[in-house]
Image: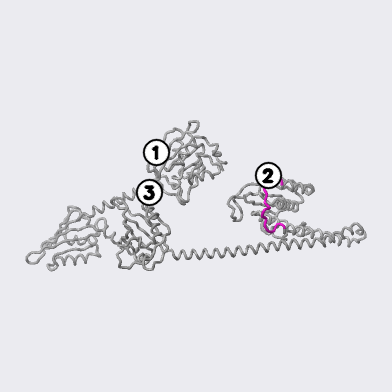
């Protein structure tokens, strides 16, 4: 297929533009698009910067590959060729006036880090953008559209917020690291402290503190322990050293701080403490971080996955216990002296060096399946590796790679077992299908032969009936004539049944090589010509819309139409002239699940006959199933079964709807 040069883009969006059905759009086919649109699309699709274009009165949407990731995995994509108002419905009250302003005035607008939430990834997300809206001229040098040049700054904005929060926490930590100072006179218990320490205790700067008051600021759980430590420090034998951690509580705010107290008592010649002073350091953040690190360490060390940190020189700085076992490293080995090449074959290490490490360094991460070699056993172990680049907080330069690796041997074994099971089941299904096809062929042959053999005695019976009618029918008594007519009617029904069985057997089996493109209007015309006298006798009329040209088995579709129309003629109401309507259209809404991805031609035959109860909508397609007595309506009970078989031969479907005393509709679904 010839592709216009302006659509020949080697990209995801280029492929979508080529595949998109433009025939129903306001823009029409691409070959008719204005030169200005083609030029702007060339610029947009060739750019590595995210761009979005609204074009024309309907503000038809175009965008390039660089913009595509901003639409997420489950949201608006693909929005190509859709109306702007439909695509951006949830934010149209914001961007709609901007577009109108640009279209009207021609003046661009620009926003930086603007919050524009919309639906993507299965939910409404808060998304920040830096973008400009610019007018784009059409071939008449008038404003024909609006070009959006944009970049998503959500990550940047969120990062700035996190950085601001981190900065505030860091500033607090710096401020909290300043020391509170204290000085106690053991003889009077007079307590002197600086303003910072008073603030921690919830006291005003001018307030004086006694030692009991200072101790009362200590959390009750720590108070006795601190009191013992103070008494011990004031004993000459202790050397006067005071070093303890505890919690203090602000008397006004209730704020708790974990502090580290370090002090020294001074003694006189009588070994009596005459001065006791020191510092108080807020170590709340440090203790909490220490506890968090301890919890994380417990988690990492008890993980069943390999967790490691690789230095830039290719040697490990850390490997957890599970990793050591997997790699065959002794528990007391110095992992910092082991190079990662020791855990790979030359081919595997070449893959790590050429693929994984460059991807991590350039993109910040890599994940996928690879393998390691156990240093002790030599076993090659498949793993799923998820690794990330570690950058220096000081310089921003890479300082290592963190990796979490999962042993997938069990997964691969299960996967292989499932694949083997699927292959075996597939073979079994193929075998059963071949048996079924052979049985169908045998059944069809049996039905054909049986029906054919039944024709011979029927022909003889018909011959004798004809002779009786010609020669001796007038000699029969009234009772005998009645029996004779019943014999004649039974033979007629038997003839109809055999003919239907013969045709039913013809529709069974393969249909390879029999499909031919046919105009269904021609087939319908032939059928109506054949049934003309029945139509006239029933005072029936038929109306038909244009039917499609389909690749079908012509004689089977002809029989399909005959059976459906004959069914309507058979079940016409006595008091209402029969009216049959034939309609056609395309649909993707099919009553049963199918594998067809291209849609269906939906053809309906609707009549105003006697109809049927909805509960019989499936039963009427079964062989020899009748909803009425044989005496009420003629027929073999095979006609609609033949219709069902014909539709199955075409990979399609037939269904029916009925309303008693109002009519019936038969739905035919031919795959496109």
Judge the density around disc 2: few (<14), some (14-19), many (≥20) Cα neighbours within 10 Å. few
Q: Tell me which label, 2 or 3, sits earlier in the chain.
A: 3
The residue tagged 2 is: 545
Residue 179 occupies which quadrant of the picture? Answer: bottom left
* Residue 308, numbered label: none
Residue stretch in magenta: 506-522
- Residue 254, by quadrant, is bottom left
In this figure, which residue is indicated by the disc labeled 1?
110
Can residue 478 be seen in the rendering of this structure?
yes
Q: Residue tagged by mark 3?
A: 155
Q: In this view of the protein, which residue sits in the foreground, 115 or 66?
A: 66
Let me know if residue 290 is in the magenta part. Answer: no
Note whether 288 is above or below 57 in the view shown: below
First in sequence: mark 1 vs mark 3: 1
Could you tell whether 583 is left or right of 272 in the image?
A: right
Q: What quarter of the picture does the N terminus occupy?
A: top right
Left or right, residue 388 beside residue 3: left
Secondary element at image label 3: helix
In this view, which residue lies farthest toward the front?
Answer: 346
Residue name at image x 61 percent, y 53 percent: 590
Contact? badges 1 and 3 (CB < 8 Å): no
Q: Position of residue 508 (x, y in %)?
A: 69, 58
- On the image, the x and y values in percent for residue 492 come to 81, 58
Near-viewer residue (346 or 607)? 346
Residue 29 vs residue 163: left or right?
Answer: right
Report the front residue among 293 and 574.
293
What residue is shown at x 47% (from left), y 51% (from top)?
74
Q: Real-space Cα distance between discs 1 and 2?
A: 54 Å
């Amino acid at each position: 297929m010839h592709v216009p040069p302006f659509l020949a883009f080697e990209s995801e969006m280029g492929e979508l533009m080529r595949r998109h059905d433009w025939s129903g759009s306001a823009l029409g086919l691409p070959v008719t698009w204005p030169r200005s649109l083609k030029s702007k699309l060339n610029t947009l699709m060739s750019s590595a910067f995210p761009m979005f274009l609204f074009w024309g009165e309907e503000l038809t949407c175009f965008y390039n590959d660089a913009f595509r990731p901003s639409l997420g995995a489950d949201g608006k994509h693909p929005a190509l060729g859709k109306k702007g108002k439909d695509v951006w419905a949830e934010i149209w009250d914001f961007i709609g006036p901007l577009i109108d302003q640009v279209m009207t005035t021609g003046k661009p607008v620009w926003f930086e880090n603007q919050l524009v939430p919309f639906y993507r990834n299965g939910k409404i997300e808060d998304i920040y953008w830096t973008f400009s809206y610019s007018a784009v001229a059409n071939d008449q040098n008038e404003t024909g559209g609006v070009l959006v040049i944009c970049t998503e700054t959500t990550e940047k904005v969120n990062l700035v917020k996190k950085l601001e929060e981190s900065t505030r926490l860091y500033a607090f930590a710096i401020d909290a690291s300043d020391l509170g100072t204290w000085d106690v006179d053991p003889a009077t218990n007079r307590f002197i402290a600086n303003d910072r320490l008073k603030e921690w205790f919830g006291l005003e700067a001018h307030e004086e503190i006694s030692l009991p008051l200072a101790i009362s600021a200590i959390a009750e759980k720590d108070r006795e322990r601190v009191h013992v430590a103070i008494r011990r420090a004031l004993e000459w034998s202790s050397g006067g050293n005071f070093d303890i951690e505890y919690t203090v509580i602000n008397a006004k705010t209730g704020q708790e701080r974990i502090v580290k107290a370090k002090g020294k008592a001074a003694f006189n010649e009588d070994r009596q403490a005459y001065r006791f002073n020191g510092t108080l350091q807020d170590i709340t953040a440090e203790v909490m971080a220490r506890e968090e690190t301890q919890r994380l360490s417990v988690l990492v060390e008890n993980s069943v996955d390999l967790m490691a940190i690789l230095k830039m020189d290719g040697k490990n700085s850390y490997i957890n216990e599970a990793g050591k076992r997997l790699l065959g490293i002794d528990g007391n080995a110095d992992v910092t002296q082991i190079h990662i090449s020791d855990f790979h074959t030359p081919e595997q290490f070449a893959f790590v060096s050429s693929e994984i490490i460059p991807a991590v360094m350039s993109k910040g991460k890599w994940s996928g399946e690879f393998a390691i070699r156990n240093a002790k056993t030599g076993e090659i172990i498949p793993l799923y590796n998820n690794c990330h680049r570690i950058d220096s907080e000081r310089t921003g330069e890479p300082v290592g790679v963190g990796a979490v690796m999962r042993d997938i041997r069990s997964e691969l074994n299960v996967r292989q077992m499932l694949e083997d099971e699927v292959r075996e089941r597939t073979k079994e299904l193929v075998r059963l299908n071949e048996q079924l096809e052979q049985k169908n062929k045998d059944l069809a042959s049996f039905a054909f032969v049986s029906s054919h053999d039944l024709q011979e005695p029927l022909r003889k019976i018909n011959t004798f009936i004809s002779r009786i009618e010609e020669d001796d029918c007038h000699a029969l008594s009234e009772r005998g004539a009645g029996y004779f007519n019943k014999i004649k009617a039974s033979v007629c029904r038997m003839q109809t049944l055999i003919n239907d069985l013969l045709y039913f057997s013809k529709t069974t089996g393969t249909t390879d090589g029999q499909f031919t493109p046919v105009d269904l209007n021609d087939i319908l015309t032939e059928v109506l010509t054949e049934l003309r006298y029945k139509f006239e006798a029933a005072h029936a009329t038929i109306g038909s819309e244009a039917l499609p040209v389909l690749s079908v088995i012509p004689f089977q579709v002809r029989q399909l139409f005959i059976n459906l129309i004959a069914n309507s003629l058979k079940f016409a109401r006595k008091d209402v002239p029969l009216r049959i309507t034939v309609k056609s259209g395309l649909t993707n809404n099919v009553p049963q699940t199918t594998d067809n991805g291209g849609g269906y031609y939906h053809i309906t035959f609707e009549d105003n006959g006697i109809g049927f109860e909805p509960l019989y909508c499936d039963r009427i397609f079964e062989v020899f199933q009748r909803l009425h007595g044989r005496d009420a309506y003629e027929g073999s009970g095979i006609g609609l079964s033949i219709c069902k078989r014909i539709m199955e031969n075409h990979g399609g479907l037939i269904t029916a709807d009925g309303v008693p005393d109002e009519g019936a509709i038969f739905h035919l679904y031919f795959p496109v």
